[in-house]
């Protein structure tokens, strides 16, 4: 078992989650050293510009390089704080980076973050570029979640078959029956609500679900969404964070 720091920034694009654990790749010992750190305002504003049109943004090499450096430096600072607080130097860093564009059907998934620079800044080994490597090997670009969920199911001794649903910006599910392991995106998670309150109320997110709790479900809109082609596709399948935000149903209603 060796000390490892995992760094993650998901489809909410709001900051960096970090955890220090001890693992050998199959077993896991958690520690109490975890952190959630919002991106600095400069990085957040840059990401907002990027997310308006990621395909066009990725063609602007100087801006991509600048944002990549900002993101990498922020991840390095988060890791350094965790190392200082814990007094433990990791032998390895798992670096997800910030996904800005995901289109596995065209074998493209773009994560901003420089693993080599991070390794230099932290003076340790860094594993990165998970999504692109997975896609090039026939996956959908999210190889880690099902493996971890399988570990949780087995560690908690949950009766098989079992599923775990993870509701992030995009929702995903893992199925494990002892022989077959399957994971895929099931649809939008928090990203539609995040986008709505950011656009309408100029808030970052619906804290505690306070705004959502005041409303009632509109099942007609739900049915419209469920008629989209994605829900008829057979797994494996995955979504970009903007897929449903760009959807005409969403645009028409909101």
Image (cartoon, rainbow, N blue to C red):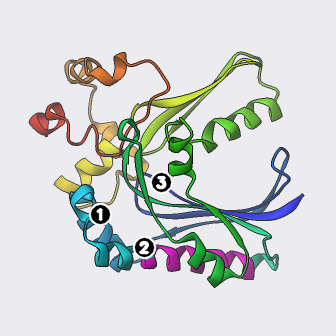
Q: Position of residue 71 (x, y in %)?
A: 46, 73
Image quadrant where one finds the C terminus:
top left
Percent x, y of residue 175: 63, 23
Vertical position of residue 18 compared to residue 177: above or below: below
Q: Main secondary structure of the magenta part?
A: helix
Residue closest to the far front: 136
Inter-mark Cα distance, 2 to 3? 15 Å
Comparing marks 2 and 3, which lies closer to the viewer?
A: 2
Q: Residue at x 30, y 73 (%)?
A: 61
Q: Which residue is mark 3?
A: 10
- Residue 185 vs residue 154: left or right? left
Residue 101 position within the rendered picture, expressed as x and y whole percent measured from the top left = 35, 52
Crowding at label 2, few (<14), some or many (≥20) Cα neighbours within 10 Å?
some
Query: Which of the two residues, 205 or 148, is positioned nearer the viewer here?
Result: 148
Please report the bounds of the magenta region as a residue range: 69-84
Out of 197 and 226, give the one closest to the viewer: 226
Callout 3: SS: loop
Please determine whether, in this image, residue 132 is positioned above or below residue 81: above
The residue where tag 2 is placed is: 68
**For discs 2 and 1, the disc positioned in front in the rendered view:** 1
The quadrant the N terminus occupies is bottom right
Residue 89 higher or lower than 227, as above or below: below
Q: Residue at x 82, y 76 (%)?
A: 88
**Element under disc 2:** helix
């Amino acid at each position: 078992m060796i000390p490892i720091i995992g760094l993650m920034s998901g489809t909410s694009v709001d900051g960096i989650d970090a955890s220090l654990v001890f693992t050998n790749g199959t077993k896991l010992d958690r520690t109490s050293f975890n952190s959630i750190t919002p991106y600095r305002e400069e990085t957040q504003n840059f990401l907002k510009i990027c997310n308006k049109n990621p395909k066009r943004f990725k063609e602007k090499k100087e801006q991509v390089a600048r944002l990549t450096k900002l993101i990498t430096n922020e991840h390095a600072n988060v890791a350094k704080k965790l190392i200082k607080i814990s007094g433990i130097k990791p032998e390895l860093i798992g670096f997800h980076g910030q996904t800005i564009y995901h289109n596995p059907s065209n074998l493209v998934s773009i994560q901003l973050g420089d693993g080599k620079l991070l390794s230099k800044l932290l003076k340790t080994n860094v594993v990165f570029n998970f999504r692109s490597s997975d896609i090039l090997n026939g996956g959908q670009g999210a190889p880690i979640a099902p493996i971890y969920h399988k570990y949780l199911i087995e560690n908690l001794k949950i009766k098989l078959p079992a599923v775990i649903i993870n509701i992030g910006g995009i929702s995903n599910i893992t199925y494990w029956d002892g022989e077959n392991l399957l994971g895929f995106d099931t649809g939008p998670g928090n990203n539609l609500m995040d986008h709505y309150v950011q656009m309408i109320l100029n808030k970052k997110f619906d804290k505690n679900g306070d705004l959502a709790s005041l409303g009632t479900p509109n099942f007609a809109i739900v049915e419209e969404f469920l008629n989209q082609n994605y829900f008829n596709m057979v797994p494996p399948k995955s979504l970009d964070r903007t897929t449903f935000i760009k959807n005409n149903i969403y645009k028409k209603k909101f």
